[in-house]
Amino acid sequence: MLLILLPSIPLLGAFALLAVGDKDVNMPFIASSITLSLAGWGLRGVFRGEQLTYTLPFSGPYSPTFQADILSCVFVFLAAFLWWAVSIYTPEYMKKEGRARSFDISTLLTLSAVLGVFLAGDLFTMLLFFELMTISSYFWVIHRRNEEAIRAGYFYLFFSIFGGLLLALGIVFITTATNGLPALGRGSIPPVEPRIFAWGLAAIVAGFGIKAGMVPLHLWLPHAHSVSPTPASALLSGLLIKVGAYGLIRTGELAGWGLQWGNTTAWLGPALTILGSCTMLLGVIAALLQSDAKRLLAYHSVSQMGYIILGLGICLFLGNAGGLSLIGAIYHIVNHALFKAALFLGVGIIYVRTGETNLYNLGGLLRNFPVTALLMFLAVLGITGAPGLNGYASKTLLHHAVSAAAETGLPLMVWAERLFVLVGVGTATSFAKLYYLIFLGRPAKVEISECESRRFHVSMVILAIVMLGIGLLPGLIPQILAVPAAQALGIKGFAAGIDHLAFGNANDVVSALITLGLGAVACRVGLATGVFHWTPPLWLTLEGLGSILCHSLRVVGRVANESYASVVRLISSMGRAIRLSVSSAYRKMNNSTDGALGSITLPGISADAALLMMTLAILIACYTCIDLQLPNLRLPLSFPAWNIFQQLPH
Amino acid sequence: MIDLVLALLSGAVGGLIIAFMPQCGSRLRNVVALSSSAAGAIFSWRVAGAVLAGRTIRIAGTNGGLAWSLHPDPLGVVFALIASTLWLFAAVYSFGYMAGEERQRTYYTYFLLALSVTLGVAFSGNLVSLYLFYELLTLVTYPLVIHERTEEAMKAGTKYIVYSLSGAGAILIAIVITYSLTGNLDFGGGALLADVSPGPGLGWALALFVAGFGVKAAVIPLHRWLPQAMVAPTPISALLHAVAVVYSGVYGILRVVYSVFGHELIGQLGFSHILPWIAAFTILVGVIIATQQDVLKRRLAYHTISQLSYILLGAFTLHPWGLAGAILHMISYSTLKVTLFFGAGIIAKQTGKVNVSEMSGVGRQLPGTLTAFGIASLGMIGMMPLNTFWSKYYLMKGSVAWGKSPLALVLIVSGIINAFCFIPTVVTAFTGEMRQPVANKERDARLMLVPTLLLAGIALLIGLCPGLVWPGVDAVINRFF
């Protein structure tokens, strides 16, 4: 019962907000506070190892089920907490954007949908909330209602719809292959038809990959995240794309972590590793080239999702030995949500006060925004993986996992490890650039409306405290959340590995510091040489390819329509010609008493009779030439007319 | 038994009362129309309840094989339920839409007669009755197509008649072949031709049946009458050309596949393996052409062509899941498509805008209408909280289980094109700038809006709880498999 209650609280909040009209209520704050406390109270049993389930008593092919295992709980808490923290920030910010009420309503609906996804107990329910989330968050993206927002909205909507359809296809394949209803949180079902099962997994990975911003399906993400209002960007980057990651983890669970069914699922690990590496690399390269702060952060979300997908891929590749990797991925999901939200909120503060998000128009704001600068600094340290903050912990875990995979000697994994390091440097570079251009550097000529506001800082401070807490006690989250979650998901063989993992390992700290240093140097070089201003040619970017594809699709549509129209024209002109010739011939016949048909004259027969005879002749010819194979042809003796004949007195 | 007769007669009686009523006030006429379509719906529900509970209802002539026969089975009652329920909504919508139009008496007369004939198609128990009612449906709906009496309408009417009657001719020949092979045309037992060994005669019969019923089911290339018939008033386009008339063709094909041939025999005919691909072709081409249309009703018409082939695809997928998908799609597509047409009608009536390119900003003027329209367009994609998700799911599942997975991909691609077809319209309607704002004519808007919103709500409800319609689907599957 609680499992339905959790998603319905924000839903009720949204209705209440509709009902109260224009009164000034911070409903997202109220609803997420209630949700957070209710979840804390209600889900405590889960951490003792229980699994909550609830099924709505619907008849027919679909009865919605809900479940909560530890993985669900991690995500539920993360979502409720993030919504709560951001909702403190929202009212002040929305004064600049306007239409606060509709924004709040879509925020509440999205929270409800997100909680529903995490608590869903079967794939249908998950898809239901997944689609609701798409629709409700769509209103975030188009909030500004300008051309750019509408365009980004189309991107978002069409990609998400495509993702939903792929998920539906995947569910079809999986249910057909396993002859069962696709339950979640109960391990995997052995497939009856392995090939169809593999196709289903591929479709589901693509479907969730769209939400997770997996290259090459990430094209919607930078647009959507940069045009939506900042609190929405924070939640989109912080949590909504993690829904995709959550789905991928569940896919791994459905696939039995690639262990049991040989080739049916063995491809999944390497495939996800490749996709994750590409996502990491392309995201960070694109981020380096951005001049808009929010777009830079958005591309970094792509890149960081690459870390998570890579972690999952390695876990699937290594099987039971890859538990570390799964823990790293889950841990990184939590951490990324925290620091990415903080970064977006910080950039949002700059935007509210200066009206500017272009990095090259900003600079030297350290004096005007000291508190924001400090909080942003913490977040930047977090995302770049500096020791002492949360990003370090999860990145170290992931790095260990990747190194372990590289030890297998498979070239793919060796390259993944190298890329991992390279992307770390790239991340440091681009955040050095972001921080330098906003807070240091030449003072900009922007107008600053009003300096610091406390209400903005409250939510950033909350996020920063949690980040610092995790950074100082890096073993806490793995121990209480990530390890039990992974164990509940069916991965066993790592419990020993995690215990002796010391996060303060000198090697790790030194390599993290080297990464940071290299990043700073690279940033200095890049700014000096102007590499960051390079715009790649259209055909080289996925965006460009996407737009070419889009354009060609439009051309296909037009060509199809034109050829259809010309075929129709051709046929109808032929039809008209036949009709005209036939009717003129018929008229000629009717006028002549001798019934002439072309050059043949049929003396003494009226034209109608001639036609009838011809038709009969054709039919007889048909019957004799084409064998219809009609055995036992019987007369319809029960036909009323026949009855009359039969009843005649002899 | 009495329910069956009453269901069948209620529309005809109402229509005749209106026909022979002197030109009196519209209120009385509306009462007659509403009560007779309500009666049709109620009695159809009662018949459906009885049939789904397993009772046999049969009225037939006594003179053997070619006698008329009414013998509803699960497939028939599902069709009857869809038609009669939507008729009620369309009747209410008509009161709003037709207010102030000319020739209302003719309109309501044939509107109600068509209800009877459609129910006749649904309830008929052998091929002869099916054929008779099928022909009659063409004749009864012809006056509704030419309602406007413009030159365009007359041309569309002629085209409609020519296409439908030639299709019916093909069906007649196919019936003759069937009768000559078996001497029995009753649907009551198993499949009619089940004992006949496969041969070219059967192939001819199947081809003729599919071509004949395919005219009304608007299979490309037999679809040309449908977009032109959109000159009819919107409730007629919504009900007849998106549901009742076209469904009689679809229903005919379902009958042919499952009652006349039976899925076992038809699987042995080589021709039957081409059929799903014809349907898939129609699905894709129909929706691609729909995206290129600017007149909203024409766009909806081509979209209808595409969606009807979803049902045919399910019918030709000789697998229980495919049949389940077909039946579910009959139910869910009809609710959503009627919603879309109703929305288009309201927009046309209230703002005078019929082209998609003019629709920017109408959402602010007609928020309720466009919300319903938006829900229905999401449904056409096959998104989860709507009923079409389930039909699409089972259609895909049927094709995969039957071993033809590419058909499932066709459905996915069609879903995406569907999104391109309607979503931009809805988005610009809400966010675009309104060019030349038109004064909102409030009159009678509610009579049109309420059925529209209700239907969208029903679609959502069935989507959340497909168990509501599942007994019917289950009964149909059990009947044929």
Image: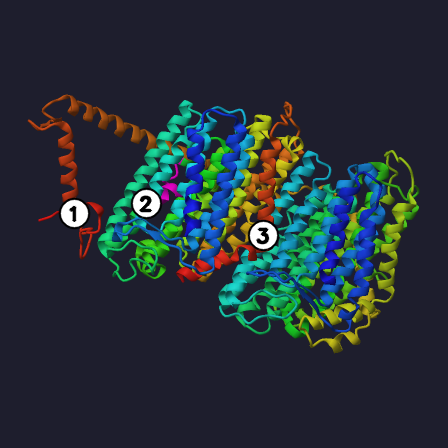
- Give A518 or B201, whichever is nearer the viewer: B201
Eyeballing the image, is A582 above or below A193? above
Q: Position of residue A641 (x, y in %)?
A: 19, 45
Identity of the residue drawn at 50% across and 31% down: B29
Tell me which label, 3 or 2, sits earlier in the chain. 2
Q: Amino acid at mark 2?
A: Tyr
Q: Classify residue A476 as left or right of residue B292.
A: right
Q: CA distance from mark 1 to mark 3?
A: 52 Å
Q: CA distance from mark 3 to mark 2?
A: 34 Å
Q: Which residues are magenta?
A: B210-225
Question: Residue A475's image quarter?
Answer: bottom right
Mark 1, residues whose alpha carbon is within 10 Å: few (<14), some, or many (≥20)? few
- Give B300 or B292, whichever is nearer the viewer: B300
Count of marks placed on residues: 3
Q: Classify residue B362 as left or right of residue A483.
A: left
Q: Of circles 3 and 2, which is in front?
A: 2
Secondary structure category for the residue under label 2: helix
Return the residue at label 3. Answer: B463
Q: Is residue B221 magenta?
A: yes
Return the residue at label 2. Answer: B131
Label 1 close to label 2 by CB (< 8 Å): no
User: Which chain does tag 1 point to?
Assistant: A
Q: Is residue B328 visible?
A: yes
Q: Is residue A76 magenta?
A: no
From this viewpoint, which residue is outermost toward the front? A649
